[in-house]
C-alpha cells in the first residue's frame, strides 16, 4: 500500500510506468512487423521459384557460374516427398525448395551444414579432407560462427579435437543431430506450407493447351 502511495505521489510516476510499457509494446510490434515483412518477402520468392519452374525451365545457380537444371515435379512426385524426409532431400527440385523454405524460417544453416557434411564424406584427398574439416568447423561449429548450428558444447569440443586429424566421421554426431532437427521440426512445416501444397495440385488444362 505504501509503495503504491509513493508511486502515486512521485511526479510522473504512473505516467513513466505507462510510458515504459507503451514503448515496450511498440518495440514488440515493430519486431513483429519486420518479421512479417521478411517472411512475406520470402513467400514471394518461393512463389517466383514455383511459377518460373516448369518441365522445360532451367534455373541458373550461384557464384561459381555453374548451371543446374531443376525440373518441376509432377504432383505425384511431389506427394512422394511427404512419405519420407530422404525422398525430399534426394530430389534436386525438392532440396532447392526446402532450402528456400528454411531461409524463410531463418534456419538455412541446418541444411547448408548437412550438405557440407555430405560433400565432406565424399572427399578422398587427405589434404582436402583436413581443409574442408577446418572450413566446416569455422563456418558452422565454433562459437559465434557465421552459420552456427545448434549443438551441445560437448559435441563441439569433440569435433574441435577430431579435426586435428580429420576423418570422414568428424561431423557424424552433429550431422545426425541437425538431420533430426530438420526431420522433426522444419520438414513437417514444409509439408504444411502453401508452397508445397501448390506443388501437389494438378495444373488445370487450359483451352489453349488442349488446342481448342
Image (cartoon, rainbow, N blue to C red):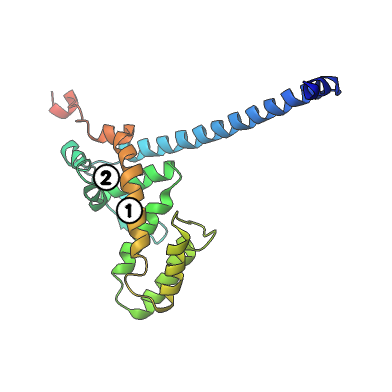
**Where does the image place residue 159, in percent across and percent down from the top left?**
42, 68
Give the secondary structure at mark 2: loop
Q: Is residue 169 above or below residue 80?
A: below
Instruction: Give the residue at x 45% y 71%.
Output: 134
Quadrant of the rendered structure where residue 158 is?
A: bottom left
Quadrant of the rendered structure where residue 33 is?
A: top right
Report which residue position mark 1 lands on.
Answer: 179
Q: Nearer the viewer, residue 97 or 136?
A: 136
**Where does the image place residue 16, in percent across and percent down from the top left?**
77, 26
Give the secondary structure at mark 1: helix
Q: Nearer the viewer, residue 154 or 120?
A: 154
**Where does the image place residue 52, in percent across and percent down from the top left?**
32, 39
Of labels 1 and 2, earlier in sequence is 2
Report which residue position mark 2 lands on.
Answer: 57
Residue that sits furthest to the front in the current view:
1
**Where does the image place residue 113, in percent across and percent down from the top left?**
39, 58
Q: How many marks?
A: 2
Label 1–label 2 contact, CB within 8 A: no
Is residue 13 rendered to the left or right of residue 25? Answer: right
Instruction: Give the residue at x 36% y 55%.
Output: 177
Amino acid at each position: 500500500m505504501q509503495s503504491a502511495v509513493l508511486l502515486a505521489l512521485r511526479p510522473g510516476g504512473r505516467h513513466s510506468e505507462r510510458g515504459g510499457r507503451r514503448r515496450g509494446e511498440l518495440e514488440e510490434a515493430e519486431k513483429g512487423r519486420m518479421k512479417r515483412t521478411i517472411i512475406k518477402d520470402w513467400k514471394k520468392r518461393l512463389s517466383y521459384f514455383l511459377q518460373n519452374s516448369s518441365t522445360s525451365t532451367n534455373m541458373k545457380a550461384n557464384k561459381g557460374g555453374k548451371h543446374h537444371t531443376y525440373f518441376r515435379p509432377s504432383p505425384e512426385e511431389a506427394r512422394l516427398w511427404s512419405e519420407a524426409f530422404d525422398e525430399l532431400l534426394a530430389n534436386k527440385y525438392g532440396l532447392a525448395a526446402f532450402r528456400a523454405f528454411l531461409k524463410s524460417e531463418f534456419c538455412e544453416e541446418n541444411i547448408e551444414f548437412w550438405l557440407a557434411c555430405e560433400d565432406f564424406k565424399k572427399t578422398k584427398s587427405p589434404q582436402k579432407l583436413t581443409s574442408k574439416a577446418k572450413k566446416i568447423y569455422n563456418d558452422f561449429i565454433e562459437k559465434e560462427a557465421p552459420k552456427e548450428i545448434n549443438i551441445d558444447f560437448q559435441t563441439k569440443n569433440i569435433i574441435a579435437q577430431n579435426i586435428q586429424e580429420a576423418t570422414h566421421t568428424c561431423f557424424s554426431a552433429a550431422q545426425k543431430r541437425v538431420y533430426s532437427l530438420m526431420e522433426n521440426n522444419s520438414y513437417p512445416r514444409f509439408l504444411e506450407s502453401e508452397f508445397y501444397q501448390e506443388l501437389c495440385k494438378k495444373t488445370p488444362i487450359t483451352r489453349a493447351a488442349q488446342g481448342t
